[in-house]
Amino acid sequence: MAFIYKFSCLAAFLGVFLAMMSVDARADEVSSFQTTARNVFIEDYETGAVLYDKLGDAHIPTASMSKMMTAYVVFEQLRAGKITMTTMMPVSKHAWSTGGSKMFLPINAQVSVEDLIMGMIIQSGNDACISLAEGIAGSEGAFVDMMNDDARRMGLKDTHFADVNGLPDPNHYSSAHDLAQIAIHLIRDFPEYYHYFSQIDFTYNGIKQGNRNPLLYKNMGVDGVKTGHTDEAGFCLTASAKRGNTRIIAVMTGLDSMNNRSAEGERIVNWALDTFKNYPLFRRGDGVGKVPVWQGVAPDVLIQVDADVTVTLPKLARRDMKVTVSFDAPVKAPIAQGQHIGLATITAPGMQSIDVPVVATSGVAALGTWGRMKAALSYLLSHKKS
């Protein structure tokens, strides 16, 4: 027989929710948000919750936001020990003559990997990207193959690279959703290198250039990640911002000016951080009650959740969250420590329900033959009286 119990500590979690507004206000606030950006995708970094999606899976030109993947491949090579920060890379005529944004590398120069990384990320130098690609893979094309291999490994279904810079090409595209995943992989997989994306400026060859991410200068918790611009893509930005225990990744494209990218980027990021919050509900090992045991040496067994659980919710929806624990009872002995007993289910308006495994805190041995006979007799007598 299946039993469903309200989580025993639910009142402790929900007691602070009573001062919140209704879920209708929450739904109106989220659904009414509008932006002039052509494509927008916002995701919570920790939980993966999608906070906003405007044509997030549509194929789009990436402009220089594709340099996030260029950087990812370079970081892989560093970690693998195939290059170091002091490895010197040659500047070919192809790198030197490439148009668009530059770190102004001299032709035939030898430049360190670290300088090229800063030129690529901070100055968005196309010449830096090509020098890194040729120095690592022998040619830009071979390096692009590495980028596409990583895209497939990441499960990016709407992404294909044709160059290392994001210059216009019909075979070079991604989506706002996929670009957000690249940013998440950069932060999660290479924390030791991610700081380059928040560096404000870099001077090379006597030329000082500032980071092109306008939100880094606004003291709003933004610490990356990459801008982009072509006539086809418009003014674009992939931003990472953190406030408290919440980090969001926001991708926006198709804005009509640098000023609009700055103003609308600030508005989009602040809206996401103001509207949503992460709520830790469980830590692995948190107890959620006890379950009756049939034919065991103990009459019941304590149960606990088997995973950490944090949910992302609009702040105004918090009062409507519910947590229940369900299991089949009584559970027949023997029971092993860690044995799966049931599920804790978290639900809230606008959120897909989450099931968390519930397991036995300790083992319960089965009764011996005489104990089982006594338990069966007791069961019969109690039911006969009733």
Image (cartoon, grey):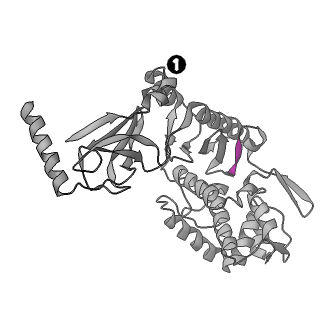
Residue interval drawn in magenta: 221-226
Q: Is residue 167 visible?
A: no
Q: Is residue 312 visible to the viewer in this orientation of the structure?
A: yes
Where the C terminus falls, by quadrant? Answer: top left
Which residue is more in the foreground, 346 or 109?
346
Q: Which residue is mark 1?
A: 19
Name which residue lies at 13% across and 41% down. 379
Q: Secondary structure at mark 1?
A: loop
From the viewer's perspective, is 201 left or right of 171?
A: right
Q: Is residue 275 above or below residue 330?
A: above
Q: Nearer the viewer, residue 374 or 324?
A: 374
Task: Check the image and name the residue furthest to the left.
Answer: 384
Residue 367, how many percent across, how many down?
A: 23, 54
Residue that sits furthest to the bottom in the current view: 138
Relative vertical location of residue 373 with respect to residue 384 in this rendering, above or below: below
Residue 279 located within the stretch drawn in magenta: no
